[in-house]
Image (cartoon, rainbow, N blue to C red):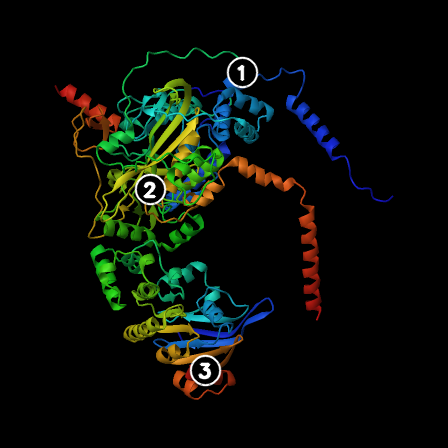
């Protein structure tokens, strides 16, 4: 049994700036891996490379399909990658507006992946959409509302519903609570934790928020200036940090 | 030999003008083009120059075309500049296109309707094959004649409105702001938008209208009605208490009927796009109607996704006199600014090369 | 048979015809798939049927009998113009009888009379891409077709039903061809969509301005997009033809006065005339 996704020796530079330097990451079915670091650490770049959005200059990313076949992500044709994003994978953007169709109703947004997967019964699609709205704590009565009339927190929850409705095996999340009020963040994290456990999803989560990582992730990868400085089980890394940078990160959380 | 600063700019300009006049005249052995010839036989060019010059005068427009050597934007500019010199002594009453003496009237929405489909003098069904017989200058065979039926030709939009299918226009009794006197302010109301479109560049509006048909902006249009014909201009001077008829002009009017908007609370209806132009200018009136409809996106609550729906983009770039002025001004000397750029670029590059060497 | 002096048979040069026929063959081999082709400037303007004209010009032969209709009628101005064009540049026999034609070029209607094997129906198409209103970028819709990802169309139908209880598309109603490609049937009324399904005649679609050709071979499955619980419903005015009495054919609405008076007549003039003549003969 191989990991769902495995990356080795990833390297990427933007001009003179090193974004990734010999980075290796793995993710297994049903586990949540958090990639943490401050801004400029390379974590967002890493997420883009792992999800196939940006090719690395060195190294490779291997993906295992539901039948067990191994594929090198950047040797796949673009069509196959798009198909992957529509079916086996999901991507939750930091800004929900990037992951939603703002001119389409909430119900239509959730229904999209269902319709792409072949659902052809309007009533049934609508029922599933209403059910998911309730699951992400949005009043199902707003199923016909356009997301541009939702608060930021509601938009984010709608994006999550829209992405998870077809139970993708692997979900990439880019700072899912970024830009939201602190009070809203906590509820959102709780909701994500519940859904991930219920649907047995694998999640690759990028965040600068150590407490979010502690709440959600089984394993944690700490990045600094494009390098992985420490990785391991979340509790172990956060309770007994070995690398000075990790120590710095964890103490700043405690003092906050 | 030491460099001597260039002088003699005025002499150079005079010489350029002299050469321009000769170029304008062309071969002196061929007959000079008369204004009547231009006005009569290049009538559609005259119409376009009047529309974009924002001034109805056929012989002035013909003169502008001659002076501009056939460059129609240059001609529109000449007419606009002349317009600025004219004093305004009143405003006419709105023209009544209901009462138009129809030369051409078609509707794409009905096969037949009261008033009929009158084809008029149109290129539409010609085959675009160069006609070398025109070289010989033979007069055309007389076209078949008929007595016009004095049958009422009610508006197609009126027929639809009678069934409640046309979204009604909001009546506005206030005197419209005058685009030629005040600058555009945003958001612009419909009256200002229509004024700007009426004098806008035909090519620009054509492209924008075309883009809405191809999916950039979303209302599928039908030509509800296209009318070309003569309307009377009436003026009521303050000294009199009745209007007087001061003359006729030809105008082209297009009303586009568009895909129905509608929501859970509002029933679906057709929506309108309107175009009006001096002379016989169908392409302009139709393009104007398409763009008018696209710009109504905001008031109809539609998502604004396409260039043709963006009010500032459309209205600020539609005036070809302004546009050509600014584009062509780049030919003026800019060497002082450019010198500045040169020095700045040299400085930045020197720094970068120095850093790379370290 | 004589053609206008100086023009090749069918107006186009032989190489152009060959190029178009190759495109047609590709199109027939992949039903519903839009094949790009090097559209030529024609003496009729873009938007007025140049695609249909180029397809007809490439397949027409001296023994063909040509019918041209626009909105279902043979005597509309554009149909007349195109028919005259082919009479001039190909000298072929022309007809108004659907049953007697070997090639029928049409704008916005499918003839009421069922077509036979051996006949060819050439459609004039303004916008070949069925999703163009939802996604105008051609590079993007190419990918969607490659992925068979037509969810944006389904989403649009979902939104229509959520907003008004109905799918709002009436003409140019998209169809799935051979269970693979989403296709625009051209702006025919949705009433005509069922006629495309397993039609014995060959259906060719030409878009001159957009420079694409596509085809539906005889007896191909063509299904209008819908939801199971909101099935496709063809729309027709609820009326009777004032000339021939038909209650089945697609009707044109004629406004007779400005007080709301109206009547209906068959849009398909040949169908109507044949019916009316049959009734007279019976009397």
- Identify the residue at the far bottom of this view: A240
Chain at tag 2: C
In which quadrant of the rendered view does residue B312 lie? top left
Q: Which residue is mark 3?
A: A252
- Identify the residue at the far left of this view: C283
Left or right of B357? Residue A179 is left
Q: Nearer the viewer, mark 1 or mark 2?
A: 1
- Identify the residue at the far front of this view: B239
- Identify the residue at the far right of this view: B1
Q: Element under label 1?
A: helix
In x, y percent, where is residue C63? Answer: 37, 26
In x, y percent, where is residue B258? Answer: 32, 38
Label 3 to label 2: alpha-carbon separation: 70 Å
Label 3 to label 1: alpha-carbon separation: 87 Å
Left or right of B32? Residue C197 is left
C75 and B340: which one is in front?
Answer: B340
In which quadrant of the rendered view does residue C168 lie? top left
Circles 1 and 2, Cβ within 8 Å, touching? The answer is no
Q: Element under label 2?
A: loop
In which quadrant of the rendered view does residue C259 lie? top left
Q: Which residue is mark 1?
A: B36
Chain at tag 1: B
The vertical placement of C33 against A203, above or below, is above
In x, y percent, where is residue A123? Answer: 20, 56
In x, y percent, where is residue C98? Answer: 28, 28
The residue located at (28%, 21%) in the rendering is B115
The vertical placement of C164 against C91, above or below, is below
Q: Residue C217 — which label?
A: 2
Callout 2 crowding tier (Cα within 10 Å): few <14, some 14–19, many ≥20: many
């Amino acid at each position: 049994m191989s990991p769902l996704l495995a990356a080795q020796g990833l390297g990427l530079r933007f001009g003179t700036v090193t974004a990734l330097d010999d980075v290796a990451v793995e993710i297994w079915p049903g586990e949540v891996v958090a990639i943490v670091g401050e801004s400029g650490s390379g974590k967002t770049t890493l997420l883009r490379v792992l999800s196939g959005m940006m090719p690395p200059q060195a190294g490779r990313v291997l993906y295992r399909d539901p039948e067990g076949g191994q594929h090198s992500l950047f040797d796949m044709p673009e069509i196959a990658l798009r198909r992957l994003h529509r079916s086996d994978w999901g991507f939750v953007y930091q800004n929900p507006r990037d992951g939603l169709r703002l001119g389409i109703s909430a119900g239509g947004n959730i229904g999209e992946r269902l319709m792409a997967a072949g659902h052809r019964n309007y009533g049934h699609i609508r029922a599933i959409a209403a059910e998911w709205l309730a699951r992400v704590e949005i009043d199902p009565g707003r199923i016909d509302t356009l997301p541009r009339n939702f608060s930021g927190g509601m938009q984010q929850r709608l994006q999550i519903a829209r992405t998870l409705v077809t139970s993708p095996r692997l979900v990439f999340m880019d700072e899912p609570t970024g830009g939201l009020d602190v009070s809203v963040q906590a509820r959102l994290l709780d909701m994500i934790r519940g859904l991930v456990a219920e649907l047995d999803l694998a999640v690759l989560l990028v965040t600068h928020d150590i407490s979010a990582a502690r709440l959600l992730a089984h394993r944690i990868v700490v990045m600094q200036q494009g390098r992985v400085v420490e990785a391991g089980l979340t509790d172990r890394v956060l309770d007994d940090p070995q690398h000075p940078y990790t120590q710095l990160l964890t103490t700043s959380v405690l003092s906050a | 030999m030491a460099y001597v600063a260039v002088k003699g700019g005025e002499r150079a300009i005079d010489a350029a003008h002299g050469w321009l006049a000769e170029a304008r005249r062309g071969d002196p052995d061929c007959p000079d083009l008369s204004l009547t010839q231009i006005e009569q036989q290049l009538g559609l060019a005259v119409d376009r120059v009047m529309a974009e010059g924002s001034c109805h005068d056929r012989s002035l427009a013909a003169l502008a075309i001659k002076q501009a050597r056939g460059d129609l934007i240059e001609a529109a500019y000449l007419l606009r500049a002349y317009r600025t010199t004219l004093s305004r002594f009143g405003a006419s009453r709105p023209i009544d296109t209901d009462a138009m003496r129809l030369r051409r009237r078609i509707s794409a929405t009905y096969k037949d309707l009261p008033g009929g489909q009158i084809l008029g003098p149109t290129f539409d069904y010609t085959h675009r094959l160069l006609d070398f017989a025109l070289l010989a200058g033979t007069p055309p065979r007389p076209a078949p004649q008929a007595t016009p039926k004095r049958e009422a030709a009610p508006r197609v939009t009126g027929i639809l409105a009678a069934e409640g299918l046309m979204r009604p226009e909001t009546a506005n009794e206030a005197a419209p702001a005058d685009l030629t006197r005040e600058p555009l302010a945003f958001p612009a109301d419909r009256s200002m938008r229509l004024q700007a479109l009426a004098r806008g560049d035909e090519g620009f509006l054509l492209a924008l209208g075309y883009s809405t048909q191809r999916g950039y902006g979303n209302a599928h249009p039908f030509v509800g009605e296209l009318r070309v014909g003569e309307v009377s201009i009436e003026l009521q001077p303050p000294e009199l208490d009745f209007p007087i008829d001061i003359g006729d002009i030809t105008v082209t009017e297009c009303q586009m009927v568009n895909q129905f908007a509608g929501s859970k609370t509002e029933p679906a209806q057709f929506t309108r796009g309107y175009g009006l132009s001096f002379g016989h200018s169908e392409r302009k009136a139709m393009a104007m109607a398409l763009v008018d409809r696209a710009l109504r996106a905001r008031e109809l609550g539609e998502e604004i996704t396409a260039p043709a729906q963006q009010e500032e983009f459309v209205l600020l770039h539609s005036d070809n006199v302004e546009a050509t002025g600014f584009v062509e001004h780049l030919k003026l000397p800019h060497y002082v600014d450019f010198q500045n750029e040169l020095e700045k670029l040299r400085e930045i590059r020197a720094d970068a090369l120095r850093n790379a060497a370290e | 048979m004589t053609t206008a002096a100086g023009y090749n048979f069918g107006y186009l040069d032989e190489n152009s015809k060959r190029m178009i026929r190759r495109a047609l063959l590709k199109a027939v081999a992949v039903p519903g798939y839009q094949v790009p082709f090097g559209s030529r400037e024609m003496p009729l303007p873009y938007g007025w049927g140049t695609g249909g004209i180029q397809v007809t010009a490439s397949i027409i032969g001296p023994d063909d009998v040509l019918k041209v209709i626009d909105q279902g009628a043979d005597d509309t101005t554009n149909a007349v113009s195109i028919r005259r064009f082919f009479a001039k540049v190909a000298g072929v026999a022309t007809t108004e009888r659907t049953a007697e034609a070997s090639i029928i070029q049409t704008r916005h209607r499918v003839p009421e009379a069922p077509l036979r094997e051996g006949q060819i129906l050439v459609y004039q198409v303004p916008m070949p891409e069925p999703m163009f209103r939802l996604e105008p970028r051609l590079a993007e819709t190419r990918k969607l077709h490659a992925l068979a990802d037509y969810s944006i169309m389904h989403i649009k139908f979902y939104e229509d039903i959520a907003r008004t209880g109905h799918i709002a598309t009436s003409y140019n109603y998209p169809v799935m061809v051979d269970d693979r490609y989403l296709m625009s049937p051209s702006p025919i009324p949705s009433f005509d969509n069922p006629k495309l399904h397993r039609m014995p005649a060959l259906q060719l679609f030409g878009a001159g301005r957009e420079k694409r050709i596509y085809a539906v071979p005889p007896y191909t499955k063509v299904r209008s997009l819908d939801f199971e619980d909101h099935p496709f419903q063809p729309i027709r005015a609820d009326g009777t033809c004032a000339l021939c009495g038909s209650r089945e054919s697609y009707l044109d609405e004629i406004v007779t006065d400005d007080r709301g008076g109206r009547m209906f007549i068959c849009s398909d003039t040949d169908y109507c005339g044949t019916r009316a003549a049959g009734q007279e003969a019976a009397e």
